[in-house]
């Protein structure tokens, strides 16, 4: 019996690039969203949901978001 993917999501995570910290929704975030969506769709991943940390880079420490 094949496994059901019903109720599952494809979680795509984008985060701010340190180089783009001064912009609105950074070009880095927009590029990451497009790249990840293209990859997911080409590989049969459906029910895409984005999770974005725009404003937080790997150099920021945030205890609770």
Image: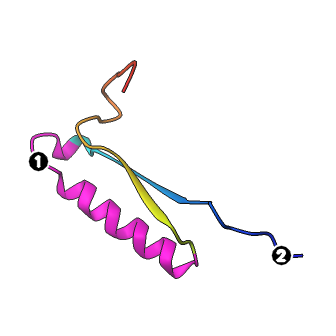
Q: Is 41 above or below relative to 62?
A: below
In this picture the colour scheme is rainbow
Is residue 42 inside the magenta stretch? Answer: yes
User: What residue appears at the point 66 percent right and 66 percent down from the top-left corner?
Assistant: 6
**x, y percentage for residue 51?**
39, 49
Which is nearer the eye, 9 or 17?
Answer: 9
Could you classify mark 2 by the number of other residues whose Cα lies within 10 Å: few (under 14), some (14-19), or many (20 or more)? few
The local secondary structure at tag 2 comes to loop
Q: Secondary structure at mark 1?
A: loop
Q: Which residue is mark 1?
A: 24
Residue 1 vertical position relative to residue 63 in the rendered view, above or below: below
Question: Between disc 1 and disc 2, whose residue precedes?
Answer: 2
Q: Which residues are magenta?
A: 19-44
Q: Position of residue 38 (x, y in %)?
A: 42, 75
Which of the 4 image quarters holds residue 34?
bottom left
Figure quadrant of residue 49? bottom left
Q: Residue at x 30, y 36 (%)?
A: 57
- In the rendered image, which residue does mark 2 sit on? 2
In the image, is residue 27 above or below residue 4? above
Kindly report which numbered mark, 1 or 2, lies closer to the viewer in this rendering: 2
Q: Position of residue 48 (x, y in %)?
A: 47, 65
Query: For the stretch drawn in magenta, what is the main secondary structure?
Result: helix
Left or right: where 64 falls relative to 7: left
């Amino acid at each position: 019996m094949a496994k059901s993917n019903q109720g599952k999501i494809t979680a795509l995570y984008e985060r701010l690039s340190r180089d783009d910290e001064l912009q609105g929704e950074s070009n880095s975030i927009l590029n990451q969203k497009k790249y990840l969506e293209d990859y997911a769709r080409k590989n049969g991943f459906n029910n895409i949901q984005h999770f974005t940390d725009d404003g937080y880079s790997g150099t920021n420490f945030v205890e609770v978001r």
